[in-house]
Image (cartoon, rainbow, N blue to C red):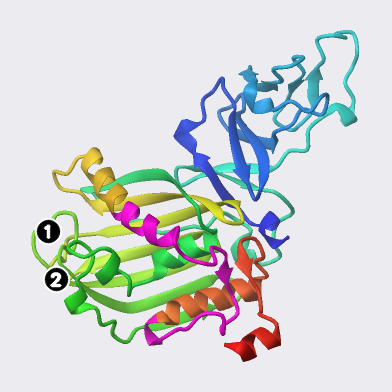
């Protein structure tokens, strides 16, 4: 499937210890990740080829992954280094592990299951330009585990119209629910989808504000699993805030997410910023986990839409063109469309 050829965020880089492997569920498969001798990252199926034990229950010694059952050890390139029960034997290629491409990027560990995608824009983990000037703090929030598809989770992040009803008092107000005209562009070569000129009125335009203002948003979608929004509140010319969302498709209808926030934090502590983000996401969670189907419909006729959904519709069309199949629903049969 096409998802095997794309980079997927798997866990926070800071959570991967030097001496202990970590388990992850990726696209419905069990994976193990560990630190290499030079501090890099390695990833492989979470199964010892000897007797099928979960390697994530083992240890990391001198950068080698050691199975907890019989002590077989594996290098970061998958080679079996040692079989303790027969120390005189030289392990061969068939004793090794099939490893995955893995790297650190933007505070997360990313993996790619298969060969690189042919589109140049998708061959590397998504790159986002986050503000880095003095006074701007960068903070990774999450993970958040959600009982929905990665597509639904991503689409919620791109949806301006829900602010007024899901986040009243902070990001929106039902009395100011109208979404004005804005521009959406699908870039060639699967480079993503961009939305500009998006404006909403917010009772609290940013974490430092005490009153409302109009806020301009700019969205960038760079992969099926990563998007960025940049906020510009009216009257806050020196304020900067960008939020990147990274989503791991765990199962077709189960996902894990992180937010990387770069913002003018003022005197706010990391704990305060995380608490605000946690509260916002919990409001989203109850909506996301109620949606049916949990898989994202890509058929334009499957759900009703309006003019405020233009970014969502472009996002779905982009997924469809890319051939994404994990956690989505494709075209409905003609008889189902006629019955609607």
> Residue 63's mark?
none
Residue nearer the viewer, 219 or 177: 177
Q: Residue 336: name its quadrant.
A: bottom right
Residue 281, percent from left and from top: 34, 54
Asked if residue 8 lies left or right of residue 91, the reply is: left
Indicate yes or no whether the magenta region holds residue 229.
no
Can you say which quadrant of the picture contains the N terminus? bottom right
Q: Is residue 130 visible?
A: yes
| Label 2, label 1: how far apart the Cα atoms are | 9 Å
Mark 1, Cα crowd under 10 Å, few <14 / some 14-19 / many 20+, is: few
Q: Please tell me which residue is depicted at 19% across the width and 59% down the height of the picture.
A: 206
Residue 332, percent from left and from top: 66, 80
Q: Which residue is mark 1?
A: 209
Is the C-beta separation of discs 2 and 1 under 8 Å? Answer: yes
Q: Please tell me which residue is depicted at 54% across the width and 59% down the height of the picture.
A: 149
Residue 293, percent from left and from top: 54, 67
Asked if residue 114 lies left or right of residue 315, the reply is: right
Q: Is residue 78 above or below residue 126?
A: above
Indicate yes or no whether the magenta region holds residue 294.
yes
Q: Which residues are magenta?
A: 280-308
Q: Which residue is mark 2?
A: 213
Mark 2, Cα crowd under 10 Å, few <14 / some 14-19 / many 20+, is: some
Q: Please tell me which residue is depicted at 49% across the width and 59% down the height of the picture.
A: 226
Asked if residue 155 lies left or right of residue 275, the reply is: right
Q: Is residue 132 visible?
A: no
Q: Is residue 25 above or below residue 123?
A: above
């Amino acid at each position: 499937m096409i998802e095997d050829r794309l980079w997927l965020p798997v866990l926070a880089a800071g959570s991967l210890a030097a001496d202990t492997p970590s388990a992850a569920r990726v696209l419905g498969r069990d994976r193990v990740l560990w630190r290499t001798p030079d501090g890099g990252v390695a990833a492989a199926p979470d199964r010892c080829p000897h007797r099928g034990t979960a390697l994530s229950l083992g240890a990391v010694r001198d950068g080698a992954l050691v199975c907890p059952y019989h002590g077989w050890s594996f290098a970061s390139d998958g080679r079996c280094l040692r079989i303790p029960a027969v120390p005189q034997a030289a392990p061969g290629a068939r004793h090794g592990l099939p490893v995955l491409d893995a790297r650190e990027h933007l505070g997360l560990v990313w993996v790619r299951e298969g060969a690189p995608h042919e589109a140049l824009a998708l061959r590397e983990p998504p790159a986002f330009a986050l503000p880095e000037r003095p006074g701007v703090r960068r903070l990774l929030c999450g993970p958040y585990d959600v009982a929905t598809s990665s597509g639904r989770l991503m689409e919620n992040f791109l949806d301006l119209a829900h602010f007024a009803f899901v986040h009243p008092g902070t990001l929106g107000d039902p009395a100011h629910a109208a979404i004005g005209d804005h521009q959406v562009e699908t870039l060639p070569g699967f480079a993503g989808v961009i939305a500009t000129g998006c404006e909403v009125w917010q009772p609290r335009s940013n974490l430092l504000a005490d009153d409302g203002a109009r806020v301009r948003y700019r969205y960038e979608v760079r992969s099926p699993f990563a998007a960025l929004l940049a906020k510009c509140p009216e009257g806050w010319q020196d304020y900067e805030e960008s939020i990147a969302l990274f989503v791991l498709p765990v199962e077709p209808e189960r996902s894990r997410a992180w937010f990387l926030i770069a913002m003018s934090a003022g005197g706010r502590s990391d704990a305060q910023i995380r608490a605000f983000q946690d509260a916002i996401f919990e409001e989203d969670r109850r909506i996301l986990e109620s949606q049916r189907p949990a898989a994202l419909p890509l058929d334009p006729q499957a759900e009703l839409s309006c003019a405020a959904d233009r970014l969502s519709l472009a996002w779905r069309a982009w997924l469809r063109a890319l051939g994404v199949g994990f956690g989505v629903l494709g075209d409905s049969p003609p008889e189902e469309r006629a019955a609607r």
